[in-house]
């Protein structure tokens, strides 16, 4: 008896049904798209901030290199504008911290140097 009464009340005012549909769609987008994306972005930022000398990185342009020097522009804080000097092949390049896409780690750099 009660479920039928609830359906009758919902169909009497279509605004509640439409509002429920929009809230459900927003919740689905939040839990499937936005929340995991935020978590992945925070993890990437933490990885980039924890760069150290000897790590192997990949830049947004596809250049693979080993971190040689980290020059922080603001004292004690890492920012996307910090300058990272990398060694790629026989060249040394200066890239911004914010342009680093992937950090392979120090072990991968040591293994690449041994070959």
Image (cartoon, helix red, strand yellow):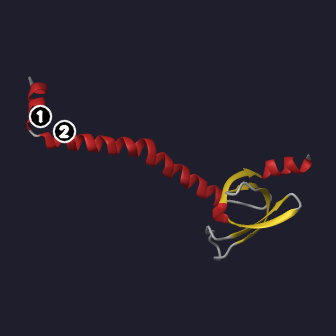
Rendered image: mark on residue 17: 2
Residue displayed at 45% across by 48% down? 35
Closer-to-camera residue (39/9): 9
Query: Which x, y percent locates residue 98?
Result: 63, 63
Which image quarter holds the N terminus? top left
Label 2: how many residues lie within 10 Å, few (<14), some (14-19) or many (20+)?
few
Residue projecting furthest to the right: 115
Q: Classify mark 1: helix, strand or loop.
A: helix
Residue displayed at 8% across by 36% down? 12
- Total marks shown come to 2
- 5 is higher (above) or lower (below) than 79: above
Q: Classify mark 2: helix, strand or loop.
A: helix
What residue does disc 1 label? 11
Closer-to-camera residue (15/39): 15
Closer-to-camera residue (9/50): 9
Residue displayed at 70% across by 53% down? 103
Query: Which x, y percent locates residue 101?
Result: 66, 55
Callouts 1 and 2 close, C-beta under 8 Å? yes
Q: Quadrant of residue 100?
A: bottom right
Q: Quadrant of residue 90?
A: bottom right
Residue projecting furthest to the front: 61
Q: Is residue 50 left or right of residue 26?
A: right
- 65 is higher (above) or lower (below) than 92: above
């Amino acid at each position: 008896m009660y479920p039928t009464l609830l359906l009758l009340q919902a169909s009497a005012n279509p605004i509640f049904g439409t509002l429920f549909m929009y809230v459900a769609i927003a919740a689905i987008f939040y839990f499937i798209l936005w929340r995991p994306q935020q978590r992945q972005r925070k993890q990437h930022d933490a990885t980039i901030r924890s760069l150290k000398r000897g790590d192997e990185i990949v830049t947004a342009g596809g250049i693979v290199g080993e971190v040689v020097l980290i020059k922080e522009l603001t004292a004690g804080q890492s920012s996307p504008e910090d300058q990272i000097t990398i060694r790629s092949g026989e060249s040394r390049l200066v890239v911004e911290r914010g342009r680093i896409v992937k950090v392979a780690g120090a072990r991968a750099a040591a293994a690449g140097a041994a070959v």
